[in-house]
Amino acid sequence: MPVAYITHPSCALHEMGDYHPECPERIAAVNDRLIAAGLDAYLLHRTAMPATRAQLARVHGDAYIDAIEAASPEQGLHYIDPDTAMNPHSLDAALHAAGAVVMGVDLVMAGECATAFCNVRPPGHHAERRRAMGFCLFNSVAIGAAHALAHHGLSRVAIVDFDVHHGNGTEDIFQGDPRVLMVGSFQHPLYPYSGFDDPAPNMVNVPLPAGSDGDAFRTAVTTRWLPALDAFRPQLIVISAGFDAHREDPLAGLKFTEADYAWVTRELMQVAERHAQRRIVSSLEGGYALSALGRSVAEHVRALIEG
């Protein structure tokens, strides 16, 4: 069964200024590497639809959605914070990024594919219920997870976040919700300077000090994530797939390699095989060294294909 590959042209039109690390070239770096690696033939290409207001409102307040819509400029850039800006295409891109995860959920729940990868931007996992931050406007993974619960009637969805930055927005939205288990690892201390402890029983945070390599990551996954996931028995796994813990990435100080991303994907595939009818939806978060990003996503997707 092929892996769904979901993107939208608007994701390459959103930009936040010259030299911003979260740049449009990230989309092409992933797409080009998948083609060069010979993986494109195994992908079911789909074009994302925009998330609806109702889908957004499951995780973001109406006033927040209104504020993001109002902040969309007709020209130039509108800065929400020093790191996060909108150009005239940003709102469209954010809606399609969230819609891509919703589409991925629909595809795996319908059995059209077992797994999906969303090559989208802006990223989402820093977006809280009522606050945009950290390059993020709408929390795409949270919106997809909430769609699985509300529209498809699932009772247990796991969110896995291996971005180098803590997924504070996803935590803000789902902490204390027994229907969602979130497991994550990230460099600490590092932006957004959160996640050092577990604020609720459904949150499993594993902070890693700067300099940690793939062995430390694998230990965290084996000792903390996998037991929690197996105890939870998720019916669907949604991945915040950030690749900025790679040793070549300029924004942080962990030392992961492509092999680490392939390994964790295979481990999650085994969890999905045991509990979730192999259903996984993965969405791009961070990753700012373009070559490393492309190589890492290719190994992540290869593992999804081979799983």
Image (cartoon, grey):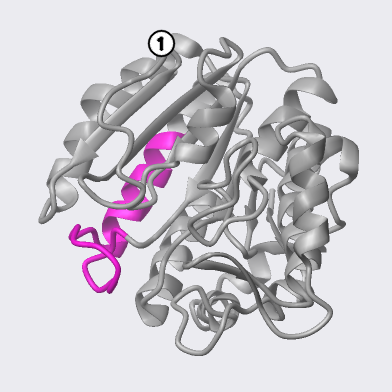
- Residue 31, relative to residue 165: is it above or below? below
Residue 224, position as x, y percentages in the image: 27, 23
Q: Which residues are magenta?
A: 245-269
User: Residue at the spot x=48%, y=52% of the render?
Assistant: 241
Residue 209, position as x, y percentages in the image: 13, 46
> Which residue position holds label 1?
201
Q: Does residue 66 appear in the picture of this structure?
A: yes
Q: Residues within 10 Å of mark 1 (few under 14, many from 20)?
A: few
Indicate left or right for 195 with 107 as reference: left
- Residue 247, relative to residue 112: is it above or below? below
Is 263 within the magenta? yes
- Residue 176, relative to residue 80: is it above or below? above
| Amino acid type, label 1 | Pro
Is 60 within the magenta? no
Q: Quadrant of residue 261?
A: bottom left
SS of the residue under disc 1? loop
Return the residue found at the far bottom: 18
Q: Does residue 221 appear in the picture of this structure?
A: no
- Count of numbered circles on the image: 1
